[in-house]
Image (spheres, rainbow, N blue to C red):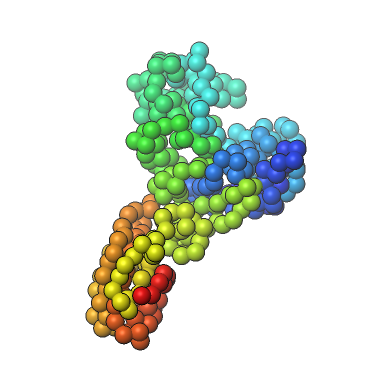
Amino acid sequence: MIELRELSKQYGALTALDRVSLTVPNGEIFGVLGQSGAGKSTLIRCVNLLERPDSGDVLVQGRSMMTLSPADLRVERQKIGMIFQHFHLFGSRTVAANVAYPLEVAGWPGARIRARVGELLELVGLTDKAAAYPAHLSGGQKQRVGIARALAAGPKILLSDEATSALDPETTRSILSLLREINRQLNLTILLITHQMDVVKQICDSVAILERGRLVEQGKVVDLIGRPGSRLHDLFYEPFHAAAWSGQAGATLVALTFVGEAAGQPVITAMARTCGIDANIIEGAVERVGATRVGRLLLELTGPPAAVAGALNYLREQGLSPEVLSHV
């Protein structure tokens, strides 16, 4: 749905984007994760050319945005909705009038606008707020208005510029759930930028990580989290501190990441029984990333060296990637 090819953007001496390339598949929720100054906002604004890259290309549904005439660019932008961190609502307009605004600009007839606004307010759960003004809404309600307005013209793509950063955790979860429902119901491709790992964990199918304007990693969220040594894995999990461990003499300390079905299987018990070793779980947790269970455990393996080596091989044969942290 979206393809960015070697995008670069400078602001004076500052490099905001440095030859960034990524592909957003149709129908996915694709996250761009990074800290402030990483280039995330510049990247997302390049998709609809609110910012024009210095070099590279932006393709939407296979069509280059960079080569469009101003008139054609306006038409293409109607296929791309956008929501913002600080909502950008018109304070002098009611909720219904805010949602109606892009349709009025596009020249829709009044009856059709009213029908469409009604559909959208029902979709975002604000039918009872149609006559209210933004000043009387909570942050979450304002963002729901922003989402409805972004969907007004029936876009194929929704861009989310830190849309939950100004919201409390509970409201953030409700907005993310709404975005996931919209994604499924409308088959809408969503490109969102965030500095919050919880956003990626809750709704993103794929993710790209930006650092100082450079793309350092991209791929399916669960694949990257389950791969020790990946940047997302390192950001997702706090490191185990092997130096603080005082285990039995001859024991081996192992970190183990589980993804999918393996997170619910008695792999440790089967390994210990098969290989003739003792396995002690020091710490760890299992949680959900989207619809997939993932977990990470810190294990103490005790037994003859050959048996421990066999246990590590057993884990690898199960599709896991044990990380040996230390021996005693």
Residue at the extreme top of the image, as rendered: 92
Q: Give the camera-side residue of 232 and 82.
A: 232
Instruction: Identify whether 22 is placed above or below 260.
Output: above
Say which quarter of the image contains residue 10: top right
Q: Residue at x 29, y 64 (%)?
A: 282
Position of residue 268 relative to residue 110, above or below, is: below
Percent coordinates x, y for residue 20 in the rendering: 66, 51
Residue 304 location, x and y as percent? 31, 85
Q: Report x, y in % for residue 319.
A: 40, 73
The answer to whether residue 131 is above or below residue 280 is above
Q: Residue at x 41, y 40 (%)?
A: 176
Image side of residue 202 versus residue 50, left or right: left
The front one of 264 and 104 is 264
Residue closer to the observer: 207 or 155: 207
**How many circles with numbers are drawn on the protein?**
0
Residue 58 visible in the snapshot: no
In this view, 228 is above or below 188: below
Q: Quadrant of the C terminus?
A: bottom left
Seen at 43% across and 54% down, the residue is 236
26 left or right of 3 in image: left
Is residue 288 at least partly visible in the picture?
A: yes
Which residue is found at the position 54% from the left and 46% from the top?
Answer: 34
x, y (%) of residue 202?
Answer: 39, 47
Viewer-nearest residue: 259 or 5: 259
